[in-house]
Image (cartoon, rainbow, N blue to C red):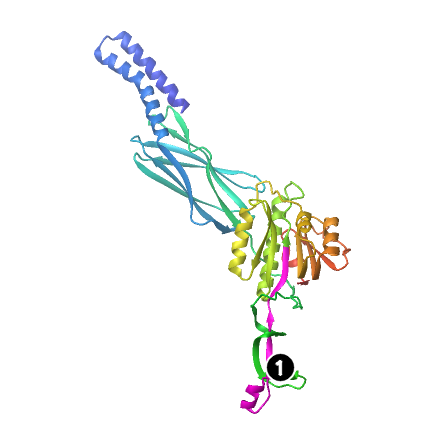
Amino acid sequence: MVIMKILFAVLIVISGIFYVMYLWDFALVLFVVMLAMPVLMFIFGYMAKKRINVEFSLKERSVMKNQEFPVKLNIENESIFPIGKAEAVVEYYNVFNNQIHSFRLLLPIQAKNDQSVSFRISSKFCGIVKIRCAYINIFDPLRLFKFKVGKNIGTEIAVVPEGHDIAGTVSYTDRINEESNKFSDIQSGDDPSEVFDLRGYIAGDKLNRIHWKLSSKKDEFIVKEYSMPVDVPSVIFLNLRCYEDSEYTLPVFDTLMETFISISKFMLENERIHSVVYFNENQGFFTERTISDTNELSEVVSELIFSISDNLYCEPPEMYFAENPNLSFSSFTFVTSAPNTDILSYINDSVDADFKNAIVVVKNYDESKTENIYGEMREIPVVIGRISNSIKDIEL
C-alpha cells in the first residue's frame, strides 16, 4: 500500500509538470483527475466501511477436545462499492490459559452481497474457546487507503473433555432415597416395594419371600426376589478452585474435568444414580445436579464449563459445608487440585459416608507419592493426563 501511495504521488507530480509545460485542456483534465482520485478512493472506502457487518457462526455450541470444528466468518457488504481485497485477522484462545493463536484470511467482498469464509480449529484441552475477529482491513480499489471494520467481533464454544476407563467397585448400602422408584435392571436387592424376579425355592430362602398364591397354582414354592434401589445418596464434589496460575493451570483443569466425567460414567455403568456439586460462577453459588443417564451427564458438563469465569474463580468449598452441615451419603468423592489438609480433614471428620474418597490432581509422579493420613477417607492422587493409570481400585 505504501508503494501505491508513492507511485500515485509521483503520477500527480508528473501530471502537474505536464500541465505547467503544456497548456492543453487534456493536461488540465489529467491533473484534476489525478488530484481527485485519492479523495474519491477515500470516500468510497469510508462509505463501504460504514455499511459492512461482520459475524461468526457455529454449527454447535460444544465439541469434543482434539476434534476439529468448522467456524464461518460472515461479512455482509450493504454498500454499492465492491471491496477487491479484505484482510481478516482471526484470533482464538482457551480462556483458561489466554495463549492466543492467530491467522489471516484474504477475501474479496462484492457490492450488495454476502461473503463467507470457513476455517477449522481444534483445542487440545477442554474449556471455553473464544474466537474473535481482531479486525478486518478493507482497501479501496487503488489500495491507497485501508479501513478497519469488524473489530473484536467474536463467539465462543465449549470444548468438552473426554471420559476414561477406571477400575473400582460400586457397593450397594442400606442408605437409599426413600422417595425414589428407580431400581436396578440387572441385580436384585432387599427392597420389598418392588419385585425384581420370580424363581424356584432354594434351601435357605426366607419364608416371607415365598409367593404363596403363585406357589399354590404351580404346586411348587415360588420365591420373590426383591429389587435393588439405584438412587442412593452418592455425591461427587468437584472443587474447581484454582490454586496456582502457571503453565499447569489448563492441564490441571482438564484433568479435573475428565476425572469427574470418568467417575460419573463408571457409576452410571454400574447403575448408580448420583449427584455432582460445583460452584456456578454465573449464579454465584454452589449447584447440585442429579445425573441418572449419559444425556444428563453431557448436559451437566456443558453447563459446568459455561458457568466458569475466565479467571477460574471459585468460592472455597468450606462455604458449601458451612451451609450444609450434617451431610450423610452412601459415597462421597471430593475431586480437587490441591492436597488441602484442612478441608480434607474436615471431610474425613464431619461428612458421614460409607465410602469417602479424595481425588487429588497432581503434576507428576513424584507428587503422587502420598500417604493416606485421613483415616476413613482414602486419598487417591491422579497425575495430569494419567487418569486410568491412577484410579484403579476406587470404592464408591
Q: Position of residue 367 (x, y in %)?
A: 72, 50
Region in magenta? 209-236
| Residue at 35% from the left image edge and 19% from the top image edge | 8
The answer to whether residue 264 is visible is yes
Query: Based on the displayed image, in which of its 4 quarters is residue 28 positioned?
Result: top left
User: Which quarter of the rendering shows the N terminus?
Assistant: top left
Q: Is residue 19 above or below residue 330?
A: above
The amino acid marked with disc number 1 is: Arg
Q: Position of residue 354 (x, y in %)?
A: 70, 63
Q: Position of residue 163 (x, y in %)?
A: 57, 57
Pick whichever, 129 or 88, lies toward us: 129
Query: Based on the displayed image, in which of its 4 quarters is residue 371 positioned?
Result: bottom right
Q: Is residue 358 above or below residue 307?
A: below
Pick whichever, 304 or 215, lies toward us: 215
| Residue at 30% from the left image edge and 14% from the top image edge | 15
In magenta stretch: residue 47: no
